[in-house]
Image (spheres, rainbow, N blue to C red):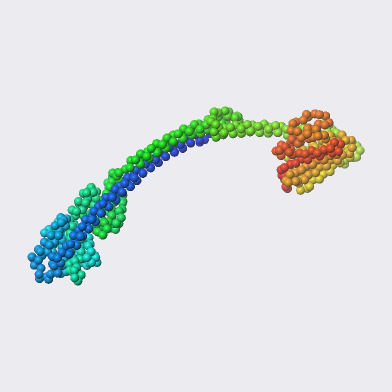
Amino acid sequence: MKKERSRQKSNKRHSLVTGLRAITFLMVLVMACSFFFAVLYLVRQERIKNIKGEAERTLTTLEDGVLAEIGRYKELSRLIMMDKGVVKYLSAERGELDGGFKRSTRYSILNILNVTTMVDSVFVFRNDGHYINSSHDKYLIDEDRRKEEEWLREILERRGASVISINGNGAIRRNNGVPFMSIGRVINDITSQEKIGILFMNISTVCLDRKLEVLGGKNMIVMSEDGIVLSGDESLKRFLPPAGCPETITHTMVQDGVSKVMISYCHVPDTPLIIACATKIGSGFVMFETVRVIMVLILIFLMLIVIASVFIKKNVTNPVKELTRAMERNKEAGRLEPIEASIVDNEIGMLKDTYNAMVERINDLFTRNIENEKVIRRAELRVLQEQIKPHFLYNSLETISYLALDAGADNVHDALETLGSFYRNFLSKGDRTITLAREVRIVRDYLALQKLRYGDVIEDVYDIPEEIGNTIVPKLILQPVVENSIYHGIRLKGEKGLIRISARYEVDRLHLIIYDTGVGMTQEQIDRCLSPEKPVEHEGPESSFGLWGTIERVRIWCGKEDVVKIRSEVGEYTEVEFIISERQEEDGKEDPGNDH
């Protein structure tokens, strides 16, 4: 059941291999789409760029042609305004203007116009309002417009320079409605430079039609600023701005039915003319060489993506998948064992080796912890057995019975209370740690009981500062050493001995020192006690198992080997010093072992 739940949980967990494959596929898809749309964008931008260039060349050519044509007619108008017949007509008295005079002036004008066929007519207006027309076509004169100041304002301000307008600046119209361009000028008297008349040379739009034919003629228009179409495709008029057309060529995109069209237009300088052309976006020139290079780059990129995908699959996804399967098999089997999988020697292989090393380390730690626990349990059990074995209890009770006979009930009561206090602190409710004060209380009670048996043979002295009494230490680290001092030191010496227990702090380390004036220890005995190897447990009176077990428990509790120093001189003394590196205190806790 547990394996089934583990398998279900594993199935729910996100797979790194699946995710990596999905991301790789997504990357390829995104990059392919990105390149595809980038190509479309670049092709479109290249096409637009070429269309703009082509439109600008067309409009520039048209503009130059229109300006050149107008310039030629300006020179022609200048000849007419200087013609003697025209000047004579403008300077003549009104009574002299008979039919023959007018025909003579008209012939003089036509003689100049023989060099061109594009001039529709020439109108010469006198100051008194009379005028002549060089053409026999019928024209309509807007007398109301002639009376407006705006009609001749710009012409008068130019003081003889030419002004381009449409339909005689709005005062002259053909009876068939066909528009025309007009070149207007002021005619001044040569001597006085006073205004004697106005000249309007009307140019046919056929010249514009011919210019458009040279450039293709389709999708082009020439119109005036006020919207009068002079030549070209009249349907383009709706795409042009109603006013304010700039002189620089401007491009704008418009929707013409189902296709997009680019409209390019500009204002012809010093004229009221606007020229424009339209080009469909799909019909422009494309630089296929650029597109070919881009497609080659796309193919190279896709090949690199495929190579990278194969490499990732071989060196990342497959090894990860194999490693995951091997770990899952161990998990389902409930084992903590090194995995055996064929994985390439790269970072994934290093991960496998690291995992195996970690498993071995964990197993080693488990084994060491179990062994340490066994050592602690054996040492505690040995000390407990030593203290509660029948002969010790019997000796204590026998001594108490002698006291009952010799000294009365008071000493019996004190002895029994000391024995109870000893065992109460000794057992300590099964705890492995104890305060230093309670540990010292155990030693005091133990020595008090031993004094009942040996009398004044043992003298005990304590140097324990009160402020470190609440420091936490492993239980029963003093009593086994004191017992060793009595049985293997003082008692064998056969004279009164001293046991001194002292404690101090140095650089956050607790130093516990047990000193006795017994027979001392040889270096061999010291080395046996300090050895990590377990000694033989029964070696007669010189057995060191109790001291060795205590040292091992302190080593395990502190987590290091260097926790004890033994100094001794044979026949003089033995001094055991424990160095506990961690300082832990239970401030404010009542020590139950201090109650009697």
Count of numbered tags: 0
- The x and y percentages for residue 548 are 77, 34
Image coordinates for residue 518, horizontal then vertical, percent:
85, 37
**407, above or below 171, in the image:** above
* Residue name at image x 11 percent, y 70 percent: 94
Residue 387 visible in the snapshot = no
Figure quadrant of the C terminus:
top right
Is 322 placed left or right of 244 in the picture? right
Give the image location of residue 375, x and y in percent. Answer: 73, 32
Instruction: Specify the quadrant of the image occupied by residue 424.
Output: top right
Q: In which quarter of the image is residue 103?
A: bottom left
Does residue 103 appear in this view?
yes
Closest to the observer, 31 or 335 = 31
Lateral position of residue 21 relative to residue 402, left or right? left
Residue pushed farthest right?
A: 406
136 shown above or below 96: above
Q: Please name the residue shown 14% across and 65% down the image.
A: 84
Rendered view: 589 above or below 228: above
Residue 123 is left or right of residue 345, and the answer is left
Residue positioned 25% across, 55% down in the render:
274
Asked whether 291 or 559 is in front, the reply is 291
The quadrant the N terminus occupies is top right
Could you tell me which residue is drawn at 72 percent across and 44 percent down? 583
Q: Determine whether 451 is above or below 216 in the image.
A: above
User: Where residue 478 sits: x, y (%)?
Assistant: 79, 39
